Amino acid sequence: MASIGIVGGGIAGLTAALALAERGHEVTLIHTGIKKTNSYLAQAGIALPLLEGDSIKAHVIDTLRGGKYLNDEEVVWNVVSKASEAYDFLLSLGMEFETNETEGGHSFPRVFTIKNETGKHLTKILYLHAKERGVSFIKGVGEELAIKHGKAYGVFVNGEFLKFDATVVASGGFTGLFKYTAGSPMNLGTLIGDAVLKGAFARDLEFVQFHPTGFMGKEGVKLISEAVRGAGAKLVTEDGERFVNELSTRDIVARAIYLKMQEGKRVFLDATGIGDFKKKFPQIYAFLRKEGIDPSRDLIQVSPIAHYTIGGIAVDLWYRSSIKNLYAIGEAASNGFHGANRLASNSLLECIVSGLEVARTIARDKPRVREVKDPPYHGYETGDVESLRRILWEHAGIVRNAKSLREGLKKLEGVEADPRLKLLAKGVLECALAREESRGAHYREDFPLMRKEFERPSFFDGKCML
C-alpha cells in the first residue's frame, strides 16, 4: 500500500487520514495540534439535506444561489449528493447531533449542530478514531512541499524531508493573512503559496468571506455564530435602527454592517429575545460573560472580520492538483463548490466529503514515488507578516476599488516577507483588480453590479488569469 502524508489536523485532514487508514495505507498526519485548527473553532454545524421536506436539489439550488452562480455545478451536485454518506460516516464514529437550525441563505433548517460547538466535538472524535486506526501523528509544522519536476515527493517538517507516495494539503485557508480574523493566526496559507510557487494553480483567490458578526474583546477577536441570528437575534445601530435582513447571505450582511460603520455608527447584535442563550450557545455565552456582557440583557457590539477563504489550490472533481501526487482538500482546496460566496455550514460538509473522496481517488491513482535526490528546500523566514495583514485588510477588504487595490500591490512590493505569502497576497489583490464586477464575497464599489462576462473562475500561477 502507498505511504500518504497529510498536512493539517482539521476535519478534512482527519477524515482523509481515517478513510485512508481503513483502506490499509500507511498514513502520517502532520499537525500543530487539533485545538489550533479552524475546524475545532467551528461553532454552528454541518449542512445536510436529510430531513423530511428537504432535498438534495433544494440544497444545490441554495448553494448555487449563494455562490452567485460562479459555482461549478457538477462539483456542487457531487458534494451535496454525498451528504448522506457523510452523515452515515459520522454516525459510525458515534456522533450524535442535538438539533438542526436555519442559517443565512438556506431555505430549510438543515444545519445539524451540537451545542453550537460542532467543530470541537467532531474534531475530537475523528482524532480518537484516527489514532485507533493506526494513523501516525507528527507534531510539527509542514513547512514546505517537496516538489521536483512537477511531481510531489513529500513534505519538509522542521527542516527534515519526509518522503510520501502521495501528499495531501489539508492545512486550511489564509484568513490569518488579514488583520482581523477569529480563526487560527497560523492559517497563513503558506502551503497554498508554496504549491503555486512550485507550479500549481490557485483558483478564485479574490473571494474572501467576511463574517458579519465578529466580536473585538479584551481577550482577542471572537466569532458570534450565524446560528445566533438564526435563533432570532437582530442587528441594530446604536440608535436602535434595524437595517438588514439578518438571514441574508454573509456578504450582504457584512457589507451592510460595514457601511453603517463607515457612517460612524456602532452596530450591535440584540440577542435579548433568545431564551436559554447559555444552554443554546455555551461557548459564546462563556466568552461574553468574561467580557462583562450578559446577552440576556446587554447588546453585543459586532463588526465584520475575515472568516473564510473560498480560493485555494485549484483541484479537480477528485481533489487532484496540477502537480502529480499532490492533492488538496477542505479550505486549502478550490474546485468551484462555493462559487463566489460560501453558504453557511457548507464548509464542514466539504471537509467530510473531500476527505472521503480523496481517499477513493488515491486508491484509484495508486501513486508511487521513487527515491529522489535533493528535493529543493528553501527554509524561508516568515518575515513581516503584519504588513501583509494590514495591506490585505485595508486594500482587499469588504469594499474594494481599483485605486485601493493598485495601492495595495505597490505597497506589497516593499514588504520583506516569505515570498510564498507575498505571492498569495499578490494573487488576492491582482484577481480582485481583474474582476471588474461585484459578485458574492467580492465587492467593487467602482463596479457595483454582477457582469455576465465575469461569470467564470479566476486562476493564478503568479499572474491572474480571468
Image: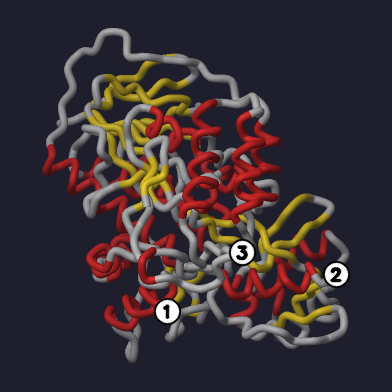
Task: Name the residue at 88% across, 64% down.
Answer: 292
**Separation of marks 3 and 2 at Cα, in angstroms:** 20 Å
Q: Which residue is mark 2?
A: 264
Dot 3 or dot 1: first in sequence order is 1
Q: Nearer the viewer, residue 293 or 207?
A: 207
Q: Which numbered tag is attached to residue 218?
A: none
The answer for how far apart the CA atoms under marks 1 and 2 are is 37 Å
Query: Looking at the image, which residue is at 53% across and 56% down?
Result: 208
Q: Secondary structure at mark 3?
A: strand
Could you tell me how far apart the alpha carbons at marks 3 and 1 are, in whole angstroms? 20 Å
266 sits to left or right of 323: right
Q: Residues within 10 Å of mark 2 (few under 14, many from 20)?
A: few
Where, by quadrant of the figure, is residue 304 drawn? bottom right
Asked if residue 14 can be seen in this view, the reply is no
Q: Nearer the viewer, mark 1 or mark 2?
A: 2
Screen quadrant of the N terminus: top left
Q: Is residue 334 above or below residue 98?
A: above
State which quadrant residue 227 falls in: bottom right
Q: Nearer the viewer, residue 26 or 148?
A: 148
* Front residue of 171 and 29: 171
- Of badges 3 and 2, nearer the viewer stands 2
User: Callout 1: 10 Å neighbours few (<14), some, many (20+)?
Assistant: many
Amino acid type at image mark 2 = Gly
* 242 sits left or right of 91 in the view: right
Disc on the earlier residue, 1 or 2: 1
- The amino acid type, in three-letter code, at marker 1 is Arg
Q: Which mark is residue 211?
A: 3
For the residues bearing labels 1 and 2, Cβ distance under 8 angstroms: no
Residue where numbered disc 1 is placed? 110
